Amino acid sequence: MLDLKGRSALITGGTQGVGSAIAQSLAQAGANLIVHGLEPNDAAIETIAQCRAHSVQVTPLYCDLLQPIDQVLQQLGDGALAIDSKVDLLVNNAGVFIDRPYLEMTEEVFNRTFHLNIKVGYFLTQYFAKHWLERGTAGRVLFTGSINGLLAEPDHSAYDASKAAVAGLVRSLCVALAPKGIRVNSIAPGLVRTPLTNKVLSQDVDAVRWMELHTPNGSVPSASACGPMAAFLLSDGAEHIHGQTIYVDGGMNAWQQPDLPASLRGHLQ
């Protein structure tokens, strides 16, 4: 079911974190990869090496996604097809969290968040959908959303709104593209350990324990937990799954709130 041999994937933001985990799972399933990143760095080199260990073709492609969309499409879309004209899997994983408290939010931060988390994936999917339809290719698209698209946090207003928009976009693109043979879905990770989240988690043991208490399976795993579901949704085994957001969150989205631990009773003010 996870056989992706003969397929080629472009993964945005694929050099670290969840994107790297997706890249490695797709490589393990046999897909050739074009791994997008902002610039060459140690994380990119490591991800590419780990993917190549599965004996697939892996090519890095560096591009600043904050450029105007026409430039992004030229560098990333045209660039990917120049590398491999058979690209038939698109993973819109790149995103950013740069929020500040709502009353301090600026238009620049808001626009940057929506540009990277929504706009790039929206138009990159359109770019490849046109390409696939011209060639009769049954393409497959995967977005990376977040549990924050469903459950809010106080100082995450723009980020939460952008990830909720991902879920809505996936449904809309399903309705627009499924009749044309193009499949669109998303994964929505809960809290996972990445180079970005590790900076916070390593400094606050109490916060980690609190997140574990809010997760039914009690786990805050590495980003590798996200890779197999991504590979499945892009595989033939998911041929009748369209327009869905699959939560990879240990059950967090299903739990209104955990019971108050006995150690906290009488200590909350």
Image: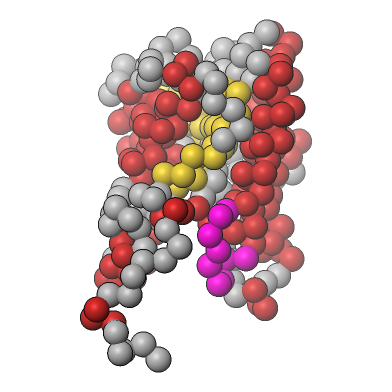
Q: Quadrant of the C terminus?
A: bottom left
Whether residue 71 appears in magenta in the rendering, the answer is no
Residue 193 in percent (x, y) is at 34, 53
Q: Is residue 194 left or right of residue 78?
A: left
Asked if residue 166 is positioned above or below residue 229 in the image, the reply reads below
Q: Is residue 245 left or right of residue 131?
A: left
**Residue 194 visible in the snapshot:** no
State the residue at coordinates (41%, 33%): 229
Q: How is the image coloured?
A: secondary structure
State the residue at coordinates (36%, 87%): 268
Residue 163 in percent (x, y) is at 60, 51
In the figure, residue 266 lies in which quadrant? bottom left
Whether residue 153 appears in magenta in the rendering, the answer is yes
Residue 85 in percent (x, y) is at 59, 13
In the figure, residue 55 lies in which quadrant? top left
Asked if residue 104 is positioned above or below residue 19 in the image, the reply reads below
In the figure, residue 120 lies in which quadrant? top right
Q: Residue furthest left?
A: 263
State the residue at coordinates (53%, 67%): 153
Q: Which residues are magenta?
A: 149-157
Q: Quadrant of the N terminus?
A: top left
Count of residue discs: 0
Of 206 and 115, which appears nearest the observer? 206
Q: Is residue 220 left or right of residue 61?
A: left
Residue 113 in percent (x, y) is at 64, 56
Magenta stretch: helix, strand or loop mostly: loop
**Residue 177 visible in the snapshot:** yes
State the residue at coordinates (63%, 11%): 137
Of 164 and 224, which appears nearest the observer? 164
